[in-house]
């Protein structure tokens, strides 16, 4: 079995479960594993933003906070309230 850790929000509970499963490889891929140059990074991010603009890729925004409420946004993230992106607005 191979588990891929995309973010650290999965938390230690999930990682303990994966570790208990026996012969498991745990991988945390980094951007540098896939994108080597600034030009490639720009090209790939342009592709991503085009896909978002056309609706091919959907971005799930779970909540929006005013920048002055950034501390509350952080508490909500730490408390795992919501699923998806959190957006701070000026």
Image (cartoon, grey):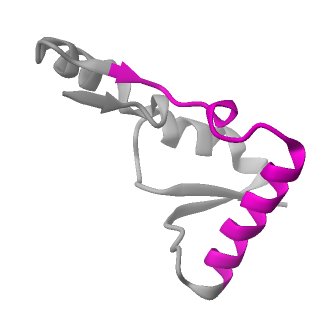
Task: Using residue 27 as the reference point, say whether residue 69 is left or right of it.
Answer: right
Residue that protrudes farthest toward the bottom in the picture: 54
- Name the spot of residue 76 as percent of width and height, x first: 50, 42
**Residue shown at 60% from the left, 38% from the top:** 74
- Identify the residue at horizontal 70%, vertical 69% (top origin): 47
Magenta stretch, main secondary structure class = helix
Q: How many marks?
A: 0
Position of residue 54 measured from the top left corner of the image (x, y, whole percent): 63, 87
Q: Is residue 25 above or below residue 47?
A: above
* Front residue (pair 3, 88): 3
Q: Please state which of residues 87 and 69 is positioned toward the viewer in this rendering.
A: 87
Q: Is residue 8 above or below residue 83?
A: above
Quadrant of image for the N terminus: top left
**Magenta stretch containing residue 52, yes or no?**
yes
Toward the viewer: 72 or 19?
A: 19
Question: Which residues make up the magenta segment?
Answer: 26-53
Q: Position of residue 52 (x, y in %)?
A: 63, 76
Residue farthest along the left direction in this orientation = 21
Q: Quick check: 41 above or below 26?
A: below
Q: Residue at x 26, y 26 (%)?
A: 14
């Amino acid at each position: 079995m191979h588990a891929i850790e995309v973010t650290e929000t999965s938390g230690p509970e999930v990682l303990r479960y994966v570790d208990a499963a026996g012969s498991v490889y745990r991988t945390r891929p980094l951007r540098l594993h896939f994108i080597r140059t600034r030009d490639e990074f720009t090209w790939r991010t342009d592709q991503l933003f085009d896909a978002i603009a056309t609706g091919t890729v959907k971005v799930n925004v779970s909540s929006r906070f005013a920048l002055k409420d950034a501390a509350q946004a952080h508490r909500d993230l730490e408390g795992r309230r919501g699923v998806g992106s959190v957006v701070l607005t000026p």
